[in-house]
Amino acid sequence: MQDIFNEHMVKKAPTPRDKMLKILIIVGVVLIFFIANMAIPMFGMFISVAVGFGAYIILGRLKKEFEYSFTNGELDIDVIYNKSSRKRLFNGNVKDFEIMAHVEDKSHENTFSTANERLDFSTGTVSDKSYVFLTNYKGKRTAVVIEPNDEMLASISKILTRRRFHPKK
């Protein structure tokens, strides 16, 4: 038997909320810099450097990439912040997926509406590669949005039957 392994990365597009948060953080850092240096001249620079470092860390967490790893039926999804730190967000077996379809497929809308939770591990914009699957994850019925490449979709479709996998038409 031959092992199946696919990896794919997608970069999360900044949302309007992310852009507003960046602006607020930068304005806040500048305000704190001026206030701290005027009010407490002796420790103002120390406070400014500490706040600036904190802002750098927070701004870095807004830069996200999702990495999908598909190995012999197991799908792992990690988030990579600022191209430096990684965190596992999802781990599941494709055999446990109830259904997988393109996000714009209206014929399965009722099925996906029964999910208790919705996780979005995609770029944030709907494309031809945007798929959603329904699974039981951490005791909850969860709909998960991903953007796999063609090779990964082909591997998933080999495991899921035609009844449970619905490619974009």
Image (cartoon, helix red, strand yellow):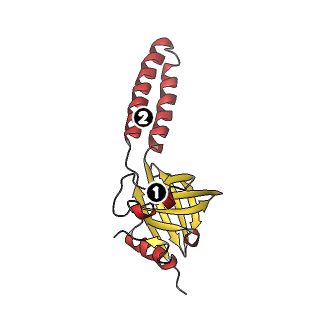
Residue 62 vertical position relative to residue 137 in the rendered view, above or below: above
Label 1, residues with CA under 10 Å away: few <14, some 14-19, many ≥20: many
Please report the residue visible at 41 percent of the width from the left and 29 percent of the height from the top: 24
Please report the residue visible at 59 percent of the width from the left and 69 percent of the height from the top: 96
Amino acid under label 1?
A: Phe
The disc at residue 153 is: none
**Residue 25: quarter of image:** top left
- Kindly indicate whether the residue at mark 1 contacts the one at mark 2 (C-beta within 8 angstroms): no
Q: Nearer the viewer, residue 113 or 119?
A: 113
Determine whether the residue tagged by mark 1 lies in a helix, strand or loop.
strand
Amino acid under label 2?
A: Leu
Q: Nearer the viewer, residue 129 or 80?
A: 129
Q: Nearer the viewer, residue 154 or 13?
A: 154
Q: Is tag 2's residue or tag 1's residue first in the polypeptide sequence?
A: 2
Q: Position of residue 147 (x, y in %)?
A: 41, 62
Q: Position of residue 33 (x, y in %)?
A: 44, 22
Q: Nearer the viewer, residue 121 or 10?
A: 121
Please report the residue visible at 55 percent of the width from the left and 76 percent of the height from the top: 72
Q: Is residue 124 left or right of residue 114?
A: left
Q: Position of residue 155 (x, y in %)?
A: 46, 76
**Distance CA(mark 2)–CA(mark 1):** 21 Å
Quarter holding the C terminus is: bottom left
Please report the residue visible at 57 percent of the width from the left and 73 percent of the height from the top: 95
Residue 50 vertical position relative to residue 62 in the rendered view, above or below: above
Q: Which residue is mark 2?
A: 21
Quarter holding the N terminus is: bottom right
Residue 37 vertical position relative to residue 56 in the rendered view, above or below: above
Q: Is residue 106 left or right of residue 74?
A: left
Q: Which residue is mark 1?
A: 66
Determine whether the residue tagged by mark 2 lies in a helix, strand or loop.
helix
